[in-house]
Image: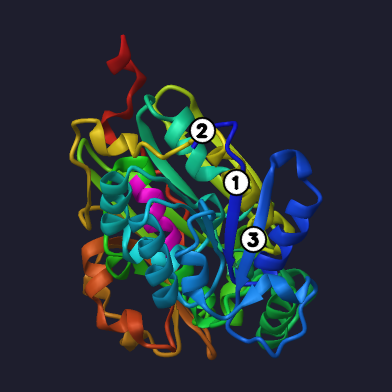
Amino acid sequence: MTNDKKLIIGLFGFGVVGEGIYRVLKQTPTLQAEIKKICIRHPEKKRNAPAELFTTDAELLLNDADINVIVELIDDSDAAWEIVSASLGSGKAVVSANKKMIAAHLAELLQLQLDNNTSLLYEAAVCGSIPVIRNLEEYYDNDMLNSVSGIINGSTNYILTRMNEDGMAYDEALKLAQQLGFAESDPTLDVLGTDAANKLAIILNHAYGIVSDPADIMCKGITQLHPADSVYAREKGYSIKLVARAQRVNHTDVAAYVLPTFVGPRSQLFNVRFEFNGVIIGTRLADEQFIYGKGAGRYPTSSAVLSDIAALRYGYKYEYKKSHTGVDYQVSDNHVLRLYVSCRDINDIVQDDFISIDETYSSQDRKYITGSISFDKLRNAAWLNNPDNSVIVFENPGVAEDHQLEELV
Ligand code: HSE
């Protein structure tokens, strides 16, 4: 696709982001991108756009030879896969924000793009408005990455901020996140950490060339957090954040998880509040860099979709450069975390699972242990899944052993 070619768009979905991009494109005529048809599931809903634009017939968009770009913004990941695979298969370029679908079908999507010499862009799928993927692909294509970690789910960050700063109850904060259009239509994806794990699976590919099954990424959300955990955090000067982390632990192994995390005031993540996301990129040469912005919501997400549409004007494709570095990175459980576990009954926690214990505390209502534990042990611990137990990891700078700058000289 070249600069002189007008982008004729078939849009799937007219929800929070779909309507957002429709409005934004109307206000960006210089882009020369026109929405020809919008496919929706519920024709009975009142829409803020001319009725003739809408259809419920997906084939009308998929078989329209004039439509050269499909923008897929629906929340049903199975239907999204059907749409996106059919579109790529017929040589149309695709912009998608569907992290669940992309994470689940990454290997097939890579192949479809190659086989059909077409482009799938999905900046909006990871951290809303923050250009994480494009940065990992283009800017950090040579400097070896030690870690990519951050707050990559806006809803949970919004809920935690409301609860900790305004004393709001969990249910009320979640309801607000839904009303504001931050949460998934199934909000359990947000609060259980699954949405962040899907995004982390995509990051793992663009940072390390790893194609992982998102279901294998260990994730704990915010539902098991207990009010006593906030008391502990306040006493120690921490903030509790849901952090996703990909961390190189040696030449080939990468730790990957989504866990509630104690973040100290010196961390860039400490002041990431509400629906904002923040990602710290740890590199071998540049040390740490931090990117920050709104991770959810109509217009922030639309901005990433708009940027992807604009990139199609000059035929932009991800090259998946990290898959061709010659280093075969893999996700590994072979690393150690510093952990806090709070519980109702200390006997629920198998203390022998820990490599070492730093502190134990017991009050009438709540007990806790802090210590070091191998990730492998933690992942397989039965007590981890007891809803009475809350697990929080200490933010771990865990520098890879071959990170030393001396190696460079
Ligand atoms: N539910 C997602 C979030 C939307 O809260 O981050 C943006 O991906």
SS type, badge 1: strand
User: Whole-percent x and y of residue 51?
Assistant: 75, 76
Report how far apart the C-alphas of labels 2 and 1 lie in the structure: 38 Å
Question: Looking at the image, is mark 1 or mark 3 earlier in the sequence?
Answer: 1
Q: Which mark is residue 36?
A: 3
Question: Looking at the image, is mark 3 or mark 2 earlier in the sequence?
Answer: 3
Quadrant holding ligand 1?
A: bottom right
| Residue type at tag 2 | Glu
SS type, badge 2: strand
| Residue type at tag 1 | Leu
SS type, badge 3: strand
Looking at this view, is 125 or 367 the one in front?
125
Labels 3 and 2 touching (C-beta < 8 A):
no
Dot 2 crowding, Cα within 10 Å, few <14, some 14–19, many 20+: some
User: Whole-percent x and y of residue 292?
Assistant: 64, 45
Foreground mark, 3 or 2?
Answer: 3
Dot 3 crowding, Cα within 10 Å, few <14, some 14–19, many 20+: some
Looking at the image, which residue is at 35% across and 63% down?
85
Tally of numbered tags: 3
* Start-end of magenta stretch: 197-205
User: Whole-percent x and y of residue 257?
Assistant: 37, 60
Q: Which residue is mark 1?
A: 7
Looking at the image, which residue is at 52% across and 84% down?
363
Considering only vertical position in the picture, is 161 above or below 106?
Answer: below
Report how far apart the C-alphas of labels 3 and 2 lie in the structure: 43 Å
Looking at the image, which residue is at 61% across and 58% down?
238
Q: Left or right: where does residue 255 sit relative to residue 236?
A: left
